[in-house]
Amino acid sequence: MGTFIAIVLAAVLTNNFITVKTYGICPFLGVSKKTSSAVGMGVAVTIVMALATLVTYPVYTLVMVPLGFGFLEIIFFIFIIAALVQMLEKIIQKLSPSLYNTMGIYLPLITTNCAVLGVAELVIGDMSQFLNGASMNLGWAVLYALFAGLGFTLVMIIMSGMREKLNCYKTPKALAGFPTAMVTASFICMAFMVFTYIQI
Amino acid sequence: MNKYKRITLDGLIFQNPTFMLVLGTCPTLGLISSATSAAGMGLTVVVILTLSNVLISLLRKVIPNEVRIPCYIVIIATLVTFARMLLEKFVPDLYDSLGGFLALIVVNCIILGRAEAFANKHNPLEAAVDGLANGFGFTCALTIMGIICEFLGSGSVFGLHVMDFKIGIFATPAGSFIIYGLSIAVFTYIINQFEQHRRVKANRLARTNMLDKEVA
């Protein structure tokens, strides 16, 4: 139970992917203009992160390391992620066209999202600081990926709410667009810094 | 010669990947709190981008159009794997400071973007020039922001102590976001002024020419 809480808190708050690790900034800045699209992107990224970890972690620990080609992880992981995203897109298209219409447009963008490859690389590295003494296994890896995705979604929703409000005000020409978004993001980061004082 | 000059200027200034197109933001924001790691990241990207541009340009007639993106990703991932091994062996300090961002060069939008937008339509020499120009545009942007961020955040530049002064926020991602945002604003402002100046000059020239013709 202790490890569960430690991983959830670390993934969502203390080690949030956007505000602390700065992974996945492209969709964070690009798709956060409207809350509905921010939620769609966040959910799509969360699903792909959890599924990608579910596949890459066993492939790495059970196949690549015993056979001695662990050093090829980047090539293998990016291929697994690309294939997975393509498959997911087809499955959603077949099962639920309405879901595909709302979420489908974000799926192709996710292949080149650093958050997905980032989490696959993180869970095969040194995770001892989050594990509270337990040893790493597939369950913890997928749990970490899932909650890291939820943390990403949380920050996306906060950001989109702030940007919708900001649209009501006039900004100088040079500051319009990305600069304003970045300064807004900076304030969210400052707010999230409070959570780094959590001791588990 | 003029063509290469235009490619270089576009990559370095007018189409600067960091400030004008806002690509490759993750490593930028993650690494500019230290000028050394920012410059190291930039130089790694210069090498990988130039090599990937040349390779893709050489193979542009061989790669079928339908599966070009997976092919580009394999080429880039292979180069990144090589770069990672070399850095781990010969520059372990830089390898440690880049951390996870080294592997994430694979999904850096600049590299895939240049492959898709430039390298698959031009010859290897032009692709190499484009790769170098864009890479150095990225490196310059990262190094400038890295110097500002590191100076404000820890009072040092490239790890050398300058003065006893520090604003803690600039050593965290929050400070990186502010510095990056404001740098984009300043850069856009300068480019806008420059373009306006050039347009006014061009208009005046055109008008004088027209008047000359009417007089003649």
Image (cartoon, grey):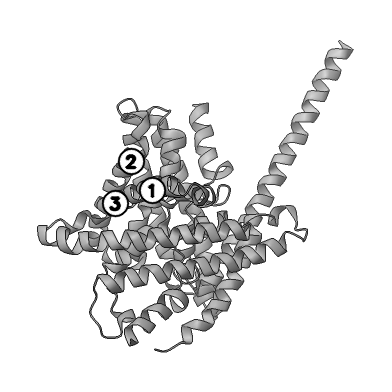
Residue position marked by numbered label 3 in the rendering? A80
The residue lying at 74 percent from left, 35 percent from top is B199
Q: Which amino acid does label 1 sit on?
A: Ile
The residue lying at 50 percent from left, 82 percent from top is A195
Chain containing the residue with disc 2 = B
Residue at the outermost front position: A95
Residue at the outermost top position: B216
The image position of residue B182, as x and y in percent, is 63, 61
Residue toward you, A72 or B129: A72
Marker disc for residue B70 = 2
In the picture, measured across the screen, residue B55 lies left or right of residue A178, that is left
Q: What residue type is labelled 2?
A: Pro
Rendered image quadrant of residue A52: bottom left
Helix or strand or loop: what does disc 1 sit on? helix
Residue at the outermost right position: B215
Mark 2 and mark 3: Cα distance apart in space: 11 Å
In the picture, measured across the screen, residue B214 lies left or right of residue A150, that is right
Q: Are marks 2 and 1 on the same chain?
A: no
Is residue B102 among the parts visible in the rendering? no
Chain containing the residue with disc 1 = A
The mark nearer the N terminus, 1 or 3, is: 3
Tally of numbered tags: 3
Helix or strand or loop: what does disc 3 sit on? helix
Q: Using the image, determine if residue B112 lies above or below residue A138.
A: above
Is residue A73 among the parts visible in the rendering? yes
Residue position marked by numbered label 1 in the rendering? A91
Helix or strand or loop: what does disc 2 sit on? helix
Q: Tell which tag, 1 or 3, sits nearer the viewer.
A: 1
**How many other residues sit within 10 Å of disc 2, few (<14), some (14-19) or many (≥20)?**
some
